[in-house]
Image: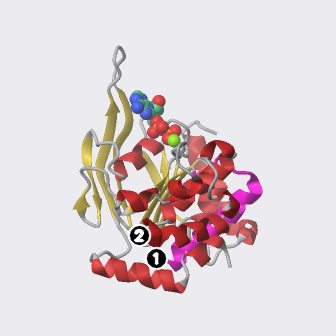
Amino acid sequence: MSWASRAFSRRSVDQAMQTQQDYGMLAASVRLDEVSRLYKRSGNSDLLAVDRVSLEVFPAEFCSVLGPSGCGKSTLLMMIAGLYPTSSGRVFINDTLVNGPYTELGIVFQRDVLLDWRTVLDNVLLPIEVKGLSKARYRERALELLNMVGLGEFAGAYPEQLSGGMRQRVAICRALVHDPPLLLMDEPFGALDALTREKLNLDLMRLTTESNKTMIFVTHSIDEAVLMSDRIVIMSPRPGKVTQVLEVDLPKPRTLETRADPHFHALVHKIREAFHSMGII
Ligand code: ADP
Ligand code: MG
């Protein structure tokens, strides 16, 4: 069994469902209503990064956002998390307007943003502290997650002692530790070697399927998006607009062999064509 599915064993899934019931939460849904983001730049003209993006992400869906560098993917994710305000338009999670940092989610940023003065374990436990939960109660779970990404021995180490890929794996554990119903991941595997990346692709797919999580996954890898997603949102170059939303109707569960399926190739080809028609590849 993989690290992610073990971490979300039947027992922890039941606990999560119980917590969801306690808070009246089901798997999260996300709705973007004409969301735009304009960056004010001193001494420069304003920069429109995201242009009227409307999108609905369904409960327990794995939705990837695919687009060229600089098209506003990270900006979009930050607005969904309530970490950047929208310039216009609105974000709803579970039909509630997001108007400040939203805490019932796990987020992995494009750069790992670990806190250098805290150990690996204390970095993973950060969401527990922020939510005012008992660190002692979650310690075992944090260690279990670290073990599963092969970092058990590094629980007491400091981030500066880790490679980029290891730091990113710590960031993934931190996003998962409080078992949130919604995950936002911004190119989380960019710094990983190809084999680790494939392993984590499979683990994340299994995790989101088994534990009823809603995922918004930003990537610029077409293959990765097709392998993992239920739907793929294709964005134009800046200012980022949604140009196409593609259903990935490949059978599940998917494995690395899925990439040999002729339909996999057809979908990859279709996406390449979409980018080609935008003058990108
Ligand atoms: P992506 O994640 O798709 O590469 P980003 O959301 O990081 O794109 O950036 C979209 C655009 O917004 C880029 O042109 C980037 O330079 C600009 N941008 C991002 N953050 C800021 C900021 N804080 N101030 C000004 N411009 C920014
Ligand atoms: Mg980005």
Q: Do the residues labelled 1 and 2 touch (CB within 8 Å)?
A: yes
Nearest the viewer among 84 and 237 is 84
| Residue 192 position within the rendered picture, expressed as x and y whole percent measured from the top left | 69, 51
Question: 38 above or below 52?
Answer: above
Residue 75 lies within the magenta run: no
Q: Which amino acid does label 1 sit on?
A: Asn
Residue at disc 2, secondary structure? loop
In what quadrant of the picture does the C terminus appear? top right
| Residue 199 position within the rendered picture, expressed as x and y whole percent measured from the top left | 70, 64
Residue 198 lies within the magenta run: yes
- Residue 212: numbered disc: 1
Nearest the viewer among 160 and 235 is 160
Mark 1 burial class by Cα count in 10 Å: few <14, some 14-19, many 20+: many
Of the image marks 1 and 2, the number of the one nearer the N terminus:
2
Q: What residue type is labelled 2?
A: Pro
Question: 276 above or below 21?
Answer: above
Give the labeled residue for mark 2: 181
Question: 186 above or below 262?
Answer: above
Q: What stretch is highlighted in magenta?
A: 188-213
Residue at 68% over, 60% down? 151
| Residue 57 position within the rendered picture, expressed as x and y whole percent measured from the top left | 39, 64
Q: Can residue 15 be seen in this view?
A: yes
| Residue 28 position within the rendered picture, expressed as x and y whole percent measured from the top left | 36, 69
In what quadrant of the picture does the N terminus appear? bottom right
Per the model, the C-alpha gap separating discs 1 and 2 is 7 Å
